[in-house]
Image (cartoon, helix red, strand yellow):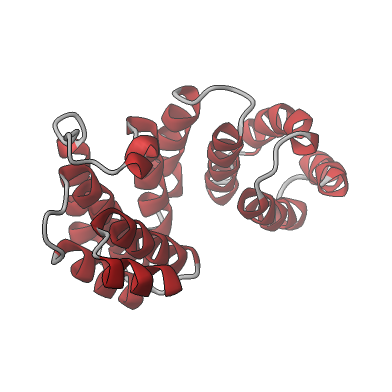
Amino acid sequence: MEAQILARQAGDGARLWFALDMLSMQGVQEGRPGEVLRLSDELRSTSGLPPRVALITRVRRARALAQAGERARSLAEMDQARGALQESVSPRDPAWVWWITEAEVVGHLGEVLMSLGDHAAAVPHFQHARDATPTGGRRWLDCSVAELSALTAAKAWRECDTLLVDLVPLLDVVASPRSRTRLAQTLRVIERDAPPWLAVNARDVAEAC
């Protein structure tokens, strides 16, 4: 919030867009769709908004609309974001948009589908995002944990077991508090709902966390 105020006072558009986007991301993470939609509208109304920033704004809106149960509108926002991906690069882009890639957008589509209850449909999108991400880094861990959460919700237990084996070696070397929190929540669901052989594996992984 302080960064947003200071950016406005300084007339620094790039940092204002960044602050508003981070507030939107936090709102999505904490399940406050009304706040995210308000912030997205505010961001869209700022002058000189580059296409790449407008694209991530659509993604935030899609996430919020999905959390609010607005299926058609959320998927329409994601369709427009994906359609604009290849043509949205502009000389006016701020430096911080480097991470807005196809893998990032596809991963958010998976999250939209998860919020809408389409867990099985979300899995291939998380897989695509993970496959398009260098193995062993924070982003790869984030994609893998998201995929595990979708597989768990879809009760795809064999696939969960395979992914758990890939995840364990990263837990000691990759720092991602958000993914670790999500992983811990997912492991608790596996321990509660999965067959005994997988519940034991999940318990072992939880202890490693």
Q: Is residue 160 visible?
A: yes
The residue that appears at 27% across and 57% down in the rendered structure is 62
Taking the view exactly as shown, the residue that stands out farthest to the front is 10
Is 25 left, or right, of 82 in this rendering? Answer: right
Percent position of residue 12, x then y? 27, 60
Is 177 left, or right, of 168 in this rendering? Answer: left
Q: Is residue 132 or residue 112 the one in the foreground?
A: 132
- Against 45, residue 80 (above or below) is above
The picture quadrant where one finds residue 60 is bottom left
Percent position of residue 184, x then y? 72, 54
- Against 38, residue 46 (above or below) is above
- Against 169, residue 149 (above or below) is below
The picture quadrant where one finds residue 8 is bottom left
Percent position of residue 91, x then y? 17, 34
Q: Is residue 49 or residue 5 the one in the foreground?
A: 5
Q: Quadrant of the N terminus?
A: bottom left
The residue that appears at 35% across and 59% down in the rendered structure is 21
The residue that appears at 67% across and 53% down in the rendered structure is 177
Q: Is residue 1 visible?
A: no
